[in-house]
Image (spheres, grey):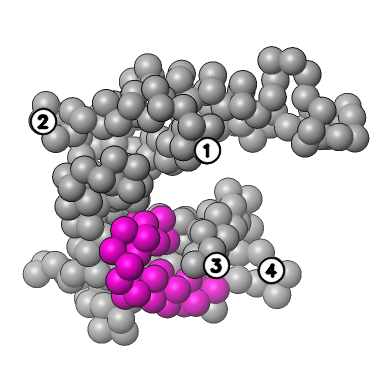
Amino acid sequence: MHKRLFLLILLFPFHYVFAQNNVLTDFPKGFTPEEIGKRLAYHFVDDRHDLYAARYIHYAEVCTWTGALDFAVRTKDQKLIKDLQNKFEPFFTREKALLPPMNHVDYNMFGGLALQLYQITKDERYKKMGLEYADTQWELPKDAKIEEKYWAEKGHSWQTRLWIDDMYMITVVQAQAYRVTGDKKYLDRAASEMVLYLDELQRPNGLFYHAPDVPYYWGRGDGWMAVGMADLLGY
């Protein structure tokens, strides 16, 4: 369901690109960004969880949740903010088992959502949870593999894998941790990681390979970098 929503959001504007000139101002009634955003956000509130192998919250759901919260804050929709907060509440109790483990970039990015909720609600539970996800991304586990130790010794996250996806997954949680704490180490982590990925993955044409051993250009991957870099440069 979240993938279909993503495609709808992605493709929706193209109808207007070819239909009219004032594509960002002259929307038909019922199709303004505010109206469409509200319908999508409230649809998400009532939707089921998107899980990895029926076990853990999927990063696609975290991305959708983050976008819905951004929309709610920007439109000052207090009911939507409360609904999105209530949707998270069971993670402290009966749905705690659905929380992603803190051992992979796709899992740890969940912390960015918790930290975003903390900034809105000032509920310390969100802060504690979110910072655990941010910090464990740089805390080498006892059973770390040789490659993970290699990256940690260089000051990078032990979860480094040189997949372009990581430029959103890592940045989103580290940047939110900086926003919450004001501790520059989180910003430095994200920036150092991004410089590494730029050096290793960006090609002369400005685009990015998915990974060094996957030498093809990936549209969504370039999108991950664009979003992550824009967020990081905002600081």
Element under disc 4? loop
The amino acid marked with disc number 3 is: Leu
The tag on residue 206 is 4
Closer to the N terminus: mark 3 or mark 4? 4
Position of 144 with respect to 16 (left or right) is left
Cα–Cα gap, marks 3 and 1: 20 Å
Mark nearest the camera among 3 and 4 is 3
Q: Residue at point 24% right, 69% down?
A: 138
Residues at circles 4 and 2 in contact by the CB criterion of under 8 Å: no
Q: Position of residue 196 (x, y in %)?
A: 47, 77
Mark nearest the camera among 1 and 2 is 1
Magenta span of residues: 171-198
Closer to the N terminus: mark 2 or mark 3? 2
Residue placed under numbered mark 2 in the picture = 93
Cα–Cα gap, marks 1 and 4: 32 Å
- Can residue 41 be spotted in the picture? yes
Q: Is 175 part of what is drawn in magenta?
A: yes
Residues at circles 1 and 2 in contact by the CB criterion of under 8 Å: no
Cα–Cα gap, marks 2 and 3: 37 Å
The amino acid marked with disc number 4 is: Gly
Q: Residue at point 53% right, 32% down?
A: 75
Q: Position of residue 117 (x, y in %)?
A: 32, 42
Element under disc 1? helix
Residue placed under numbered mark 1 in the picture = 74
Position of 198 with respect to 60 (left or right) is right
Cα–Cα gap, marks 3 and 4: 17 Å
Closer to the N terminus: mark 1 or mark 4? 1
